[in-house]
Amino acid sequence: MSDEKPFIIFGAKFPDIEILISRINLKQKFIHVLGYVDDNPNIDRKNLFNRPLLGGIQWLSENVSRVKVVCTVGRTLDDRRNVLNKLDQINVEYGTLIDPESEICNSKIGKNVLIFKNAIVGPNARISDHTIVSFNAIVGHDSEIGENNFLSGGVTIPGGVRTGTNVHFGVNSSCIPGISLGSNIRIGANAAVMMNAKDDVVMIGNPARPMKKSL
């Protein structure tokens, strides 16, 4: 029997995590998941895939030394950042989950990173902590993806791109090689970013232009 710590899932409203866990269990190794932890008192237990709701952050603080955490919570990236700050205060140990049918090519992958089926991370790329790389997303060679980014399904980030923290790429969005994106940016679905972008903007369209302050 493995002596690796069991996982808990912090945040009970991201069902794609169950797809990732089941695929890893089927094709790679068994991940022991104790259950969900969430501070929302209105969680519908029917949506927990037969896993227990263990409690909230208080339960986690009392059991922090014996589990690994993957955090899926956050209606927005700002919400997610606030939750991560609370988890950091109790010194949680984060885990990272990578689908066995993704392609990771001599890249650096941070903690609490989720990488889904058919994602590609190219040579010498870096995926920083707390980032989600969804189904069929591509990160090209030598790109550096900042902390707490969300790459939706079908996103294409070519080589040499740099992003700051809290950047959300909408479904099927893309950008040209070598650009730099600041922090707190939202990129709309199907947008094509062809210029550098400063902090706190929303990018929409093809070609994408900064439209307004990020919410």
Image: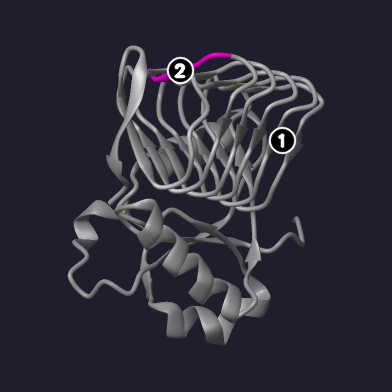
Q: Residue at x 63, y 51 (%)?
A: 129
What is the magenta range?
A: 171-176
Q: Residue at x 34, y 47 (%)?
A: 14
Q: What residue does disc 2 label?
A: 174
Q: Is residue 175 magenta?
A: yes
Residue density around tag 2, few if under 14, some if 14–19, many if 20 or more, within 10 Å: many
Q: In this rendering, is residue 27 above or below 91?
A: above
Label 2 is placed on what type of residue? Answer: Ser
The answer to which of 103 and 197 lies nearer the viewer is: 197
Q: Quadrant of the N terminus?
A: bottom right
Percent x, y of residue 98? 62, 36
Q: What residue does disc 1 label?
A: 126
| Sequence order check, earlier mark of 2 and 1 | 1
Which element carries disc 2, helix, strand or loop? strand
Residue 174 in the figure: left or right of residue 159: left
Q: Residue at x 31, y 28 (%)?
A: 188
Label 1 is placed on what type of residue? Answer: Arg
Percent x, y of residue 24? 58, 35
